[in-house]
Amino acid sequence: MHAPLAFLTRPEGGTAKISREWLEAADWAVLFTLGTLFFLLGAFAMWAWILWRRSTRPEPHMKLLMELEDEAEQEKHAAAREEPETQAPWEQSADWWKRQS
């Protein structure tokens, strides 16, 4: 046996007698802790579900704003494709090395 444990006193009956009031309080503490845990798990699950629902099915006004933004991007890309790139006289084309041989 370890030396520090030899100084600890042990009850004669093997276990300490605990009054019923303390046992009930301990039971309620465990139940309260479990209730809090399940409540928090439910709250996080509800929060995750709301975020998922809002991202998959946006409200009509948000959907309209997203569509307008997509249209503006498409117009910007279409305008960029239509304008030919003008080069300065000293610039070479991208395939200049193919024509030299």
Image (spheres, rainbow, N blue to C red):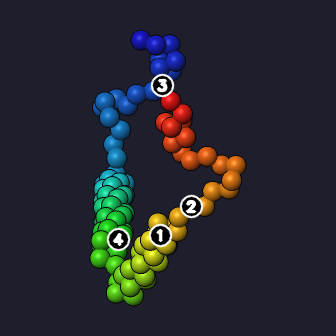
Q: In this view, does 84 lie to the left or right of 33?
A: right
Q: Do the CB atoms of the residues marked 1 and 2 lie less than 8 Å apart?
A: no
Q: What element carries label 1?
A: helix
**Which residue is label 1 attached to?**
82
Q: Do the CB atoms of the residues marked 3 and 2 lie less than 8 Å apart?
A: no
Q: Earlier in the sequence, mark 4 or mark 2?
A: 4
* Residue 88: image location, x then y, percent: 68, 56
User: Which residue is at 52% across, 68% downward?
Assistant: 83
Q: Residue type at mark 1: give it.
A: Glu
Residue sitting nearer the eye, 95 or 76: 95
Q: What element carries label 2?
A: loop
Q: How far apart are marks 3 and 1 (CA)?
A: 89 Å
Q: How far apart are marks 4 and 1 (CA)?
A: 34 Å
Q: Which of marks 3 and 1 is in front?
A: 1
Q: Do the CB atoms of the residues marked 3 and 1 lie less than 8 Å apart?
A: no
Q: Which of marks 3 and 2 is in front?
A: 2
The answer to whether residue 39 is visible is no
**Which residue is label 3 attached to?**
8
Q: Tell me the crowding category of disc 3: few under 14, some 14 to 19, or many 20 or more residues within 10 angstroms, Cα based.
A: few
Q: How far apart are marks 3 and 2 (CA)?
A: 89 Å
Say which mark, if any, is on residue 85: 2
Residue sitting nearer the eye, 92 or 41: 92
**Which residue is label 4 attached to?**
55
User: Does 67 sit above or below residue 20?
Assistant: below
Q: Earlier in the sequence, mark 3 or mark 1?
A: 3
